[in-house]
Amino acid sequence: MESLPSKSTRALGGVRVLDISNFLAAPMCGMFLADHGVDVIKVERPQVGDEIRRSGETKDGVGLFYKVLNRGKRSVTLDLKTEIGAEALKKLVKDVDMRAANRGSDLLSLSVQIAQSSCDLSNQVQSFPLVTG
């Protein structure tokens, strides 16, 4: 079997995305981006994580579908209700090219508030696709 090229030489190498999503639609978007070389950083809540972690067949206590949807991503656990978690998110937001999330999630609502408060749009262009499905 032929190995994949390194992330930096793939089509979207050098792009960084903050993945503030859960369950299915937006994580799948992040999965495809990671497949094409994007450095995807997934944010999850402490103790709860992504809801799909506990869905379907599991191995070592983690849902296999979760493992597929989050392949190639880096992950960070942040409690956005704490000052430390909110500050960490603000730092991440300033260092990414794009943010992606599910429409209507609690994590999204809090993340958007924090992220928008830390964006200086005069020197940085970012998109925030919201995925439903």
Image (cartoon, grey):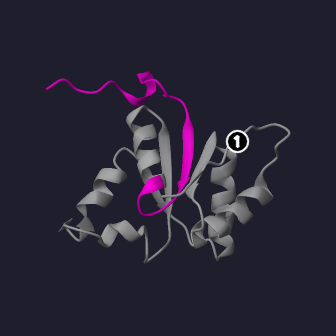
Left or right: residue 16 compared with residue 89: left
Q: Is 23 one of the magenta-colored residues?
A: yes
Q: Which residue, as the protein is rendered here, is positioned at the far left?
A: 1
Instruction: Give the secondary structure at mark 1.
Output: loop
The residue to which callout 1 is attached is 126
- How many badges with numbers are in the image? 1
Left or right: residue 102 compared with residue 34: right
Q: Where is residue 18 in the image (x, y as percent from the top left)?
A: 56, 50
Q: Is 73 one of the magenta-colored residues?
A: no
Residue at left 46%, top 46%?
Answer: 29
Q: Position of residue 125 (x, y in %)?
A: 74, 37
Q: Quadrant of the N terminus?
A: top left
Left or right: residue 42 compared with residue 52: right
Task: Label the magenta part by its dominant secondary structure.
Answer: loop
Q: Position of residue 61 (x, y in %)?
A: 23, 71
Q: Nearer the viewer, residue 57 or 47?
A: 57
Left or right: residue 60 compared with residue 80: left
Q: Which of 23 and 20 is in front in this view?
A: 23
Q: Position of residue 30 (x, y in %)?
A: 46, 46
Crowd around label 1: few <14 · some 14–19 · many ≥20 (10 Å): some
Q: Which residue, as the protein is rendered here, is positioned at the far front?
A: 133
Does residue 71 appear anywhere in the picture?
A: yes
In the rendered image of this protein, does residue 27 appear above or below residue 52?
above
Does residue 96 appear anywhere in the picture?
A: no
Badge 1 amino acid = Gln
Residue at left 70%, top 41%?
Answer: 126
Residue at left 53%, top 30%?
Answer: 14
Q: Which residue, as the protein is rendered here, is positioned at the far right?
A: 122
The magenta region covers 1-25
For residue 7, which quarter of the picture? top left
For residue 107, which quarter of the picture? bottom right
For residue 55, which quarter of the picture? bottom left
